[in-house]
Amino acid sequence: MNQLPDVCHARSSIVWLRVISSLAWLDSALVGKDAKLSYAFLSGVELAKRIGETFVLTAVTPGVSALLRNVVLPHAQIFAILIGFGDLAIGISLSLGLFTRLGGMLAILRAVTNILVAGGAGPDTVGFNAMLIVAGVIGLTTGAGRRFGLDRLLLAQWPAAKLLRLVA
């Protein structure tokens, strides 16, 4: 029995949402003066500078600000590496449809973190990250990589792999 055209269009729309949201994560990791994979950021220097000058002031609660000063700042290089490669992994996952559910879950986690750390900067920061959370939830709950993505190929190759079904 053939699927209705509306169902096919809805599935294709989810693929476009997945790919477009991946561009935000790839941009964060690779592009511009704020690129998370730049040497200045990965060394921890730029992250420490942002924490001291901006994030302690824009954190949504005093508890988040204290966490940034007492936990993240002393270990800025470790957190910078996690952030930089995390953003790259999310972007690759969502753009290729590879382990899409895992990528969606990490996108939600990173976007919530962004809101907690920089949410006091204004509604544009919160709104943009809320959009990334919604895209992550859709990727997580719909298996968006199973339509047009590498998840489809992996699941066809290993249909009984339970862990793969969980992350793809």
Image (cartoon, rainbow, N blue to C red):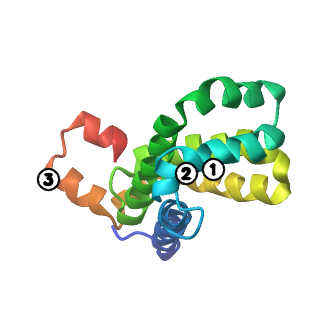
Instruction: State the SS at label 1.
Output: helix
Which is nearer the N-term, disc 2 or disc 3? 2
Expressed as whole percent of the image width and height from the top left, the position of residue 4 reads 46, 71
Expressed as whole percent of the image width and height from the top left, the position of residue 125 reads 76, 56
Residue 136, numbered label: 2
Q: Which residue is mark 3?
A: 157
Of residue 46 and residue 103, the one placed in the foreground of this image is: 46
- In the drawing, does residue 64 fall left or right of residue 167? right
- Estimate the spatial distance between the alpha carbons at disc 2 and disc 3, rounded to whole Å: 25 Å
Quadrant position of residue 153: bottom left
Instruction: State the SS at label 3.
Output: helix
- Residue drawn at (53%, 62%), measured in percent from left and top? 35
Residue 55, numbered label: none
Image quarter of the N terminus: bottom left
- Residue type at mark 2? Gly
- Estimate the spatial distance between the alpha carbons at disc 1 and disc 3, rounded to whole Å: 30 Å
- Residue extending farthest to the left is 157
**For mark 2, does the 10 Å Cα neighbourhood hold few (<14), some (14 to 19), or many (20 or more) residues?**
many
Asked if disc 1 and disc 2 are in contact, CB closer than 8 Å, the reply is yes
